[in-house]
Image: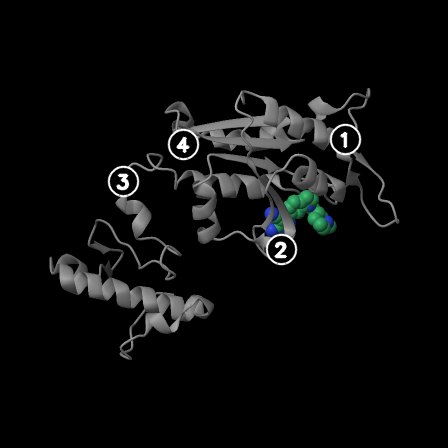
Amino acid sequence: PAMRVDVVTIFPDYLAPLDLSLIGKAREDGLLDVRVHDLRDFTHDRHRTVDDTPYGGGAGMVMKPQPWSEALDHVLAQDNPSGAKPRLVVPGPGGQPFTQALARELAREPWLAFACGRYEGIDERVYDHAREDLGLEVSVVSLGDYVLNGGEVAVLAMVEAVGRLVPGVIGNAESLVEESHEDGLLEYPIYTKPSSWNGREVPPVLLSGNHGAIAEWRHAQRLARTAARRPDLLHASHATDGRDVEISA
Ligand SMILES: CN1CCC[C@H](Cn2ccc3ccc(-c4n[nH]c(N)c4C#N)cc32)C1
């Protein structure tokens, strides 16, 4: 069965890239069922108001609870005779870090719903309502330690990272194995034809046909790159043999 993904946003066009390339093909192939909903469709005033001033003062505006409540009701009711529940993911700068491990966890869910906030965010009672009245598991998730203007960019990233882990979405299964963060190390340098370009040569080991040596060289490069760029990812389990390795920048 397809994984179902619902996204609620005031900028539905922002999610248009999901119709392209891999995710778009996965939708055509029935592997992903992605539905985008305009939050303003769940307002009833002439100006289709979704925000108002914050209680307690402060800068910016807060997203009103009622439109979110009606949008979530619509998501839960649409094509859902069994009354199944989605896992609700709400992007936010204060959320738990979005990591490959979390992407793998989310890829096992049959149904995800994403709530894209804008302005200063969503009235806190929406989170309480979703957990306590709708019985949803709600995860607030952050793309990284920087401030965006809303959740849409984060949802594009999360749907791509999760979608590509859904069986069948990525054709060549191997391409999922050797990649950054899959086993905690960054990826090795990659090369293609021509072997000599601009006076620069491909490392000879890669042309040697000696697959043991190639695998060893690649692992050494991954260790060295991780040590240079992401020492925080290195664990004792990645013990090096102590030999120095020349790495590209
Ligand atoms: C000045 N204020 C501060 C609070 C956030 C306000 C903008 N905003 C409203 C909704 C919303 C959702 C996600 C993110 C976001 N920022 N950084 C990340 N890694 C995110 C993620 N996922 C940002 C958002 C701007």
Residue indicated by mark 3: 172
The residue lying furthest to the left in this view is 209
Q: Distance of mark 3 from mark 4, alpha carbons?
A: 15 Å
Where is residue 171, by image quadrant?
top left
Rendered-image quadrant of the C terminus? bottom left
Earlier along the polypeptide chain: callout 3 or callout 1?
Answer: 1
Q: Specify whether 220 is left or right of 125.
A: left
Q: Amino acid at mark 4?
A: Ser
Q: Are marks 2 and 4 in contact (CB under 8 Å)?
A: no
Q: Secondary structure at mark 4?
A: helix
Where is residue 85, by image quadrant?
top right
Q: Residue at x 79, y 28 (%)?
A: 49
Q: Amino acid at mark 1?
A: Gln
- Mark 2 Cα-neighbour bin, 10 Å: few <14, some 14–19, many ≥20: few
Earlier along the polypeptide chain: callout 2 or callout 4?
Answer: 4
Say which mark, if any, is on residue 66: 1
Q: Is mark 2 within 8 Å of ligand 1?
A: yes
Q: Amino acid at mark 3?
A: Asn
Residue indicated by mark 4: 21
Q: Distance of mark 1 from mark 4, alpha carbons?
A: 35 Å
Q: Distance of mark 3 from mark 1, alpha carbons?
A: 44 Å
Q: Amino acid at mark 2?
A: Tyr
Please tell me whether residue 190 is drawn above or below residue 219 in the rendered image. Answer: above
Mark 3 vs mark 4: give the one in front.
Answer: 3
Q: Secondary structure at mark 1?
A: helix
Q: Distance of mark 2 from mark 3, alpha carbons?
A: 33 Å
Earlier along the polypeptide chain: callout 3 or callout 4?
Answer: 4
Residue indicated by mark 2: 146
Let me know if residue 148 appears in the view.
no
Earlier along the polypeptide chain: callout 1 or callout 4?
Answer: 4
Foreground residue among 2 and 218: 2
- Mark 3 Cα-neighbour bin, 10 Å: few <14, some 14–19, many ≥20: few
